[in-house]
Amino acid sequence: MLLVLLLLPMCWAVEVKRPRGVSLTNHHFYDESKPFTCLDGSASVPFDQVNDDYCDCKDGSDEPGTAACPNGSFHCTNTGYKPLYISSRWVNDGVCDCCDGTDEYNSGIVCENTCKEKGRKERETLQQMAEVTREGFRLKKILIEDWKRAREEKQKKLTELQAGKKSLEDQVELLRTLKEEAEKPEKEAKDQHRKLWEEQLAASKAQREQELATSAFQELDDDMDGAVSVAELQTHPELDTDGDGALSEGEAQTLLGGDTQTDAASFSDRIWAAIRDKYRSEVLPTDLPSPPAPALTEPREEQPPVPSQPAEEEDEEEEETEEEEGGEEGEEEDSQVPGEQPKETPPPVVPPQTASPTEEDKMPPYDEQTQAFINAAQEARNKFEEAERSLKDVEESIRNLEQEISFDFGPNGEFAYLYSQCYELTTNEYVYRLCPFKLVSQKPKLGGSPTSLGTWGSWAGPDHDKFSAMKYEQGTGCWQGPNRSTTVRLLCGKETVVTSTTEPSRCEYLMELMTPAACPEPPPEPPASGNHDEL
Amino acid sequence: MDAAEKEEISVEDEAVDKNIFKDCSKIAFYRRQKQRLSKKSTYRALLDSVTEGKESTRFQIINEAAKVPLLAEVYGIEGNIFRLKINEETPLKPRYEVPDVLTSKPSTVRLISCSGDTGGLVLANGKGDLKCHITANPFKIDLVSEEEVVMSINSLGQLYFEQLQIPPKQRATKENEEDTSDDTTQENQEELGLWEEKFRNFVDVKDNGPASIGLDFSLHGFEHVYGIPQHAESHQLKNTSDGDAYRLYNLDVYGYKIHDKMGIYGSVPYLLAHKLGRTLGIFWLNASETLVEINTSGDTEPAVKDALTQTGPVAVKQKVRSQTDVHWMSESGIIDVFLLTGPTPSDVFKQYSYLTGTQAMPPLFSLGYHQCRWNYEDEHDVKAVDAGFDEHDIPYDVMWLDIEHTEGKRYFTWDKKRFPNPKRMQELLRSKKRKLVVISDPHIKIDPDYLVYAKAKEQGFFVRNHEGGDFEGVCWPGLSSYLDFTSPKVREWYSSLFAFSVYQGSTDILHIWNDMNEPSVFRGPELTMQKNAIHHGNWEHRELHNIYGFYQQMATAEGLIQRSKGKERPFVLTRSFFAGSQRYGAVWTGDNTAKWSYLKISIPMLLTLSVTGISFCGADVGGFIGNPKAELLVRWYQAGAYQPFFRGHATKNTKRREPWLFGEEHTRLIQEAIRERYTLLPYWYSLFYSAHVASQPVMRPLWVEFPDEVETFGVEDEYMLGSALLVHPVTEPKATVVDVFLPGSSEVWYDSKTFAHWEGACTVKIPVALDTIPVFQRGGSVVPIKTTIGRSTGCMTDSPYGLWVALSTKGSAVGEFYLDDGHSFQYLHQKQFLHRKFSFASGVLINSCADKRGHYPSKCVVEQILVLGLKKQPSSVTSHSPDGKAQPVAFTYCAKTSTLNLEKFSLNIGADWKVQIQ
C-alpha cells in the first residue's frame, strides 16, 4: 500500500509546467499570462521578472529558482523521493541539496539524481519502521492489558492487604493485652523471688559483718579481757584519722566513741562500721578478697605501642612526599594517634561476675511456679512481636502497592512493566545501568564503584509529548560542576533495550531506551484511492 | 594519570595560580641588573677604534668594570632603519644570535660618517635626513631625524652586558678577577643567581653563568607606546615604575589574569611609539626571557636638554615636553636592535615587515567562521554539529577537533573507536565545501610502539636535557619528549609527516592547529621547559625559549605546503609565537574566560598583535573557560565577527554552546552576526591582501588611521577595520547605549545599518539593542561585499557582489578589491588574481584595474550599489560597460537618509566600467 502511495507522484508531478523552484501546490500563483504578484502581496512585477536573478519581492517569492533573494525558498520535486524546500541561497552554490539535483542547474557541477535510491532506502526504512511500529504497538497493547490486569490484581491485593491489616491490627491489640496480662503474674512472681533472695543476701551479709567484727575484736583484744582498749586500738596505725600516720590516743578514743574501751557487743554495733574499711587484719589476707583488677589491665597496657608504630611512620612518609609543608598536620596526627589507640583496641571484657563469684552473689533459680509464669509471658511476648512484624510487613506492602498503583506510567500505564527492571549498556569504558523510575548509574568496566547519574525526577518530554523522555536528577556531583543528570529518550522498538549513552555536555547524560511502550499507533491502512499530493 | 593531575593544576581551576609563575623579584638577571645599575658604571665609546666596514661601522665600548671592551656595530638598513649590535669582541664561546626571524639578510645602506665636535661621531644616511650621533663619553647614541632628536640610546646609562666567564670551579687556579671579588658570600651568590637559580622546587643550573644584557631608549616627545605582545593588557603600554615590568616569556597560563604584565603564550619583542608627526619602532631581536620597563614622564628632564646641546650642530628647536624611557633586559644572547624610524605608522609597518615578513595570505575559508570544542566526541557528533549549522541556516567553514581525536594523544593518529573513518567524515565536510582542522602539539608520547616517537627517538630529534638524555616532561599524553624544532633537520622531517601518504586519514581539506608550544610542560618550572635543556647546536633552551613555538608553526606550514607539492596555501593556527610568526598563519589569545572583562580585553590584545605584524589573530568566541550566558555569547559573536580570526571554542567541562542552543531569538542573533561576517568577506580578503603585500594591519587602532589626532592615541574600545570601517563592539552587559568616538574633524561617518550620518571629531551616543553591532563606514570609502550568503565561503564563490559607497564631505570615495582562487599560490606564481580599484568622484563611479600584472577570470557580477551621503536625488543613472554601451540603471533614492540604491545592476566585477549619476 505504502509503495503505491510513494510511486504515485512519479506519474503525476513531472509534466506540469511551472517556473523553476515552484512547488506544484503553488504553481497556480505563477501564471505567465499575468503580472506576478508577490505571495505576500507586497508588490506586483511583470512576469518576465520571475526568476530573472533579481530580487523584487520582500518575501523572495519572485525568485524561487535563483539565489537572488536572501529569504526565498527553492522547491525540489525530488521525484521518487520526498519533495523538499531548501533555502534559495543554496541554489547553484556547488552543493547538491536536492536528490534530483535541480538546485544545481548552473554551477558547473553535476549532481547525480539519487532520488530513486534514496526513495528505495527511505521506503525500506519506512517499511521497517512501520513493521517495528506495528509490532511494537501490538506489544504495547499487551503491555497495557498486562498492566491493567496487574494493576487490578495489585488493587485487589491492596484491598485484601488493607482488610487484612485491620484484622491484623486487632490481633496485635489482642496479643498485646494477652501479653500484658501474662506479664503481670510473671512480674509479681519474679519480684517476690528477688525480694526473698535479697533478704537472704542481706541476712548473710549481716552475719558476715558480725563475724568480721567478732574476729577483729578478738584480734584487737590483745589481752583477751573481753574488751578493746584505747591502747589496743592504737596498735593499728592504719586507723589514723588525721592523716599523720599514727593513731593517737585521742583519735583512738574518738573511734571508741569517747570511751576508753569497748566490749564485743558494742564494738560490733557501733565501732566496727567506722573502722572496717581501714582496718587491716593481722593475719594476712585470708578473708579479704583481693582486687583482681591489676592482673586484668596488664595485657591492655602492653598491646597498643606495637601496632601503632608502623602506622605512624607510614603516615608521615606519605605526607612528606606529597607536600613540603605538611608539618602542622603531621604533628596533630602524632598527638592524635596514641590518644585514639585505646578507643580502637577493644578493652578486655571480663564479666564482673566471673571475677570471684561466690555462691551467695548468684540469684537462685526461679521456683517452678515462677518459671511457669515466665514461660507463659515469654510466649505471649513472642506471639505479639510476631504479629506486630507481620503488620509492619503488610503496611510496607501497602505503601509499595499504593505507590506503584498511583505512579504515572504513561497514558495507559504502558511503561509500568519497566518499574522493577534494570537495563544495561556496555561501552568502551563503562557499564551504564538504567533502572527506570529509580536511577541511572555508570560503572567503570574494569571495576570500581558506580557513579550515580541521577535518580528519578519526572517525565520530561515536550508538552505535547510528555512521555517521550524521562529525567533523572541529582546524581553524584561533578568536580566544580553541577550534579550529574540524565535524560532518557524513549524510542519505539520491539524490544526493551538501552541503545546509546552520550554526554553531550559535561555531566549531562543522554540515554536512549527502545521500548514497545513508546510506539505510536500506526496509521490505519491507507484507503485504496490514496491522496494525490506530491507526498 | 599525569594528565589528570594537570587538570587539577590548571584545567579545572578557573583562576590562575600566580605562584606558579615568576614576578620580576624572582628573576635573578633582573635583580642583578637593578643592583649593578644602582652603582652606575658608565660605558664610553673608544672612537679612535672606529672602523668602517662594508656593511657597518664598528667601534669599541668599555666601562671600568669590564676590562675587555665590547664591540658595537651600527648598520644602515634599507627603508630608513638602523641596526645596532653590541657583543663581546671575543666571547669565551659564541653568544646566541636569533636566526630565521629576519626574512633575509637585510640590505644595508652605506652610512656616511663625519666626526662631530667634542669627540663624537655622526653617521648619516645617504640623503642626510637621518643621523646617528654617537657620543663617546658617556656612551650614547642620538637618533636625529631632520634636525630633531627623536630617540636616545643609553642616555640613562642602563647599558648592561655580562661577559661570559669561566665557571668558578675551573677558575680556582686562575687569578681572581675583579668582578668575582665583591659578591662571594653564599647568600649573595644565591641572590644573584649567577651559576644557579632557584625557583620553588626547581634549580636552574647555568653552565654558561650570567650572560644578561640590557639597554635603555629614551623617546623624546613620546607619551604613547604600544606593542610587545603578548599580555592581557591595555593597548597603550603602561608605566611600569610602580610595579612589574612587561615580561616576554612564553608560558601556558590557563585562564590568565587580565590587566597583568606577566608573560603569556607568545612574544614579539617589538615596541612602537607614536606622537604627532612621528611613529617609531624598536625591534629587540632576542629570544631569551626579556623584560621591558616603560617610564613615561610628562616633564622636561634637564639631563635631556644638556644632552641635546652637546650634539652641537643639531640645534634644539623643539620643546621637549614629555619622554618615554624604554628599558629592555634579556637573560642572554646579544644586543641586536633595529630602530625603525617611520615617520608614519604605515612606514613603520613596512619597515618591520621588511625585516620579519608580512602576514601570510590566508586561504579564503580561514576567514569564515570556525567551530571548535574540546572535544567533538566522534564522527557522529561532528556530523550532527555540521548538520546543525545547515538546519539553522548559519554559515560556517571549519570544523575543529581537539586532542581527543587522537589515539591517546598521539598526534597524527585517530582514535579508532571515535573516529573510525576520518576520510568519510572529511568527505562529508568537503561536500559542503567545508574544512577540518585538527590539533598537533610538539610533545610526543614516550611509547616505542608509536611510530612518530620511535622515528624521532632513533634520529635524535628530541630536545635533550642538561644531562644529555632526551628531555622528558609531562603533557597531555603523560610522559613525553619534545621535538627540537630549532633544528632544520627536525623541521624537515616533521614537515614530511603531513604528507598524505604518511598522515593516515588526512585529506587536502585537513589543516593544522599547533597548541601547547610555549612549550607547555606540566611539571616543569612555570609549566614550561627547564632553561638548561639542550637544543640543536648545543644551545641552551634559555637562549631561544621564546622562539620554540615559532619554529613549530614554521615546520607545520611548510609541511602543508609540501603535501600539496607547493601549490596550496596552508592554514596553521598557533598559540605560541614570536616576531615573524605572521608568515606562517594565525594566532589566538589562548585560554580566556567566559566573562565580559575578557571579551573587552580581546580588543586591545588583538590590536597589539595587529600592530606588531600579526594581523591574523583572534580570541576564542564565548570564552574558553566557563559557561557564557546567552547575552555574553551573542555579544561575543558580534565582536568576533569583526575580528580577524573568528572561532568559537570551549573547554571540556563547559556546557554545549553551539549557536542554536540558546533559544530561537539568540540563535537568530548569532546567525545574524555570522552572516555579517560573510557579507563582508570580500572586504576582509582585500584587507588581508593589503596586509600581505603592503604590510598594513587588518585591524587597526584608531591612532594608525588618525595619527594626527591626539584623542585617538589611547582609544582601545573601538578600532578600524582597514581604513573604511569603525567598529565599536558592545562589551557591557545589558547595554542600551554606547558612546562611540568618531574621529576626524573633516570626516563624515555613516551608521552601516541605519545610514544615519555624523560629522567626525565627536562622541555620539548610539542606542543599542541586542541585535546592534555598532559599525560605521567612513565617508570616502568603498567597501565590497557579498549580497548573498551561502553556507560556507566555498559555496559563495560565484555569488554576486555589492558595493557600499560612502561619500566624503567632498562627495568622493575610493576602495579596493582583491580576488583570487582563494586557496592556491597561483596568485603569486602565475599572477592569477584580480585587483580592482573603485573610485567615486563628481557623480561617477569607476571600476578600474589596480594592478595590471594580475589576471583572474571571474563570472561574478556587481548587482547592487549603495551610495551613502548623496545629497541630491539624481535624475538619471547610466552604466557604461567596457564595450562603451550605455544603459540606464534603475534606482531608488531615499531623501531622508540621502541614500541611493542602484538595483538590477549586473556588471562583471573584473571589468572596467563606470556608472554615472546625474
Image (tube, rainbow, N blue to C red):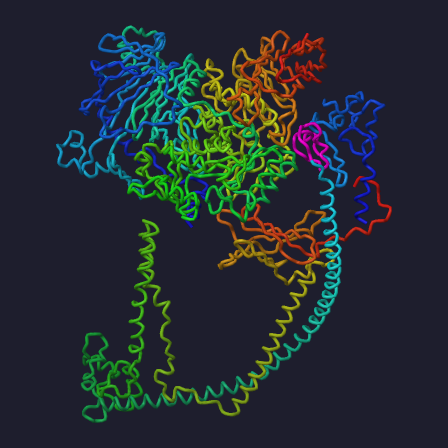
> How many numbered markers are drawn?
0
Residue placed farthest to the right in the image? A529
User: Which residues are the magenta region?
Assistant: A86-111
| Residue at far bottom of view | A225
Q: Position of residue B67 (x, y in %)?
A: 17, 24
| Residue B908 as seen in the image, left or right of residue B536 | right
Q: Quadrant of the C terminus of chain B?
A: top right
Q: Is residue A455 above or below residue B723?
A: below
Visible in this render: residue B837? yes
Instruction: Tell me if A392 is positioned left or right of B415 in this view.
Output: right
- Coordinates of residue B118 in the picture (x, y in percent): 22, 9
Residue B629: name its quadrant.
Answer: top right
Residue B721 visible: no
Q: Main secondary structure of the magenta part?
A: loop
B27, A526: nearer the viewer: A526
Residue B112 at x, y percent in the picture: 30, 9
Q: Is residue A313 magenta?
A: no
| Residue A6 location, quadrant | top right
Q: Is residue A149 above or below residue A458?
A: below
Residue B203 in the image: above or below residue A50: below
- Give the residue drawn at x 34%, y 43%: B470
Q: Is residue B343 above or below residue B203?
A: above
User: Which of the two residues, B226 or A27, is positioned nearer the viewer here?
Assistant: A27
